[in-house]
Amino acid sequence: MENFRKESDLLGELNVPLDAYYGVQTQRAIDNFKISGQLLSSYPDFIKGLAFVKKAAAKTNYELGLLDENLYFKIAEACDEIVEGKYHDQFPVDMIQGGAGTSINMNANEVIANIVLEKLGKNKGEYEFCSPNDHINLSQSTNDAYPTAIKMGLLQMNTGLVEKLEKIIAAFRAKGQEFQDVIKMGRTQLQDAVPMTLGQEFEAYAATLEEDISKLNNNAGLFVEVNMGATAIGTGLNAPVGYATLCAKNLAQITGFPIVSAPDLVEATPDTGSYVIYSSAMKRLAVKLSKICNDLRLLSSGPRAGLFEINLPPMQPGSSIMPGKVNPVIPEVVNQVCFKVIGNDLTVTFAAEAGQLQLNVMEPVLSHAIMENINFLCNALDTLRDKCVVGITANKEVCLNMVKHSIGIVTALNPYIGYKQSTQIAKEALETGKSVYNLVLEKGILSQEKLDEILDPKNMLKPHNK
């Protein structure tokens, strides 16, 4: 037993690894919650969020005369080290646990306390000199510290997600420029429509994703309102006068985010509306991203019996039985990520709805679902950009031949010969296999010069006068 130290809590004594910076309550969480396999240590921005909150709380307590200067500086130093990436392996609690986040809050309290004890020349577990509850958790409850830490984590993670999104938008836009002269058929309901360029198609992908940058940032902006100082239920019991406003100010200074104190702490403590609306923005992005991947799979289908308008970079052999087959594996995996994101959004919805009275105890699964979604989307966006979009090439002749032989170009004749006569031409072209071009000339409907002008695909790519 020499590799363990004994710590005690409400339920009695428990062995904790001697070299662990966490303590008895974290150890109970390790023993109790073997659920998702995804640990707090898998989410470094969340750990940084906890350190931000604990540093801001310590600074506020010091400024209000509740914490002596030496202990405050040691706590601040410990928090800074955690923000820098140290001690993250000391956060082994499963992301999904009962207790409304108490295990994660106490994990942070214990780790910071034991780091401070080392700095004071004391042994881990000598909590009379620096206590997880009396010093690190001073003027706080899990019910204000934990959701505030989630929000600090999500603000950081959103910044990373938006950066990934901006990069893939730039990749699609570059392809739009590269393919600006590749004429092809547009399609509606999987049927021939009217001509366009492949560049217009890829520019549209960039434009639709670009819309989501403002949605993500605006919705993440709701996370700047925090309930520090609410303590257990929003009444501020055990927090000094002025703590809530000052703590929010300190948190803003520490993080660089415009953090403010919620105007009604009783309302803010059980409220999870900001998570719901941010999750919905990620769902919107996932739906769009999945649609784009559907398109890429269709446009690259073939090579002999599909559309084959574009080539995706070949990433791996596509079959264990069919020689030469290569599958669109990157769009496929991104589709699956999008399905996961959409499903997690429903989890967020149920978890938010499950709040009761002055607290929502489902915040662990709620925060896990959102953070998992951000990680999945970041990885998917990078993968789609690096292993697919930047390497896409166009099959120009295939695209052009489809335009030349399409019935869809008859739409351009509507303003000149009327919808009824255009329909008759289209029907005859389908029945006889003749081209629209030849049928119009045979029937003497238009001169060749006028017909060439109207049916020049380049003239059908934008509005024009007759």
Image (tube, rainbow, N blue to C red):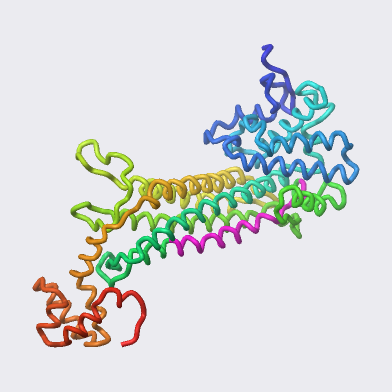
Point 83% across, 50% down: residue: 243
Could you tell me residue 158's position as x and y percent?
A: 58, 52
Point 39% across, 57% down: residue: 292
Q: Quadrant of the N terminus?
A: top right
Q: Main secondary structure of the magenta part?
A: helix
Q: Is residue 250 above or below residue 105?
A: below
Q: Is residue 40 left or right of residue 10?
A: left
Could you tell me residue 304's position as x and y percent?
A: 18, 53
Q: Nearer the viewer, residue 128 or 70?
A: 70
Q: Is residue 8 above or below residue 255?
A: above
Quarter assignment of residue 263:
bottom right
Q: Is residue 48 left or right of residue 447?
A: right
Could you tell me residue 63's position as x and y percent?
A: 88, 45
Q: Which residues are magenta?
A: 206-231
Q: Is residue 15 visible?
A: no
Q: Is residue 349 left or right of residue 186?
A: right
Point 58% across, 54% down: residue: 353
Q: Is residue 133 above or below residue 371?
A: above
Magenta run includes residue 228: yes
Total marks shown come to 0
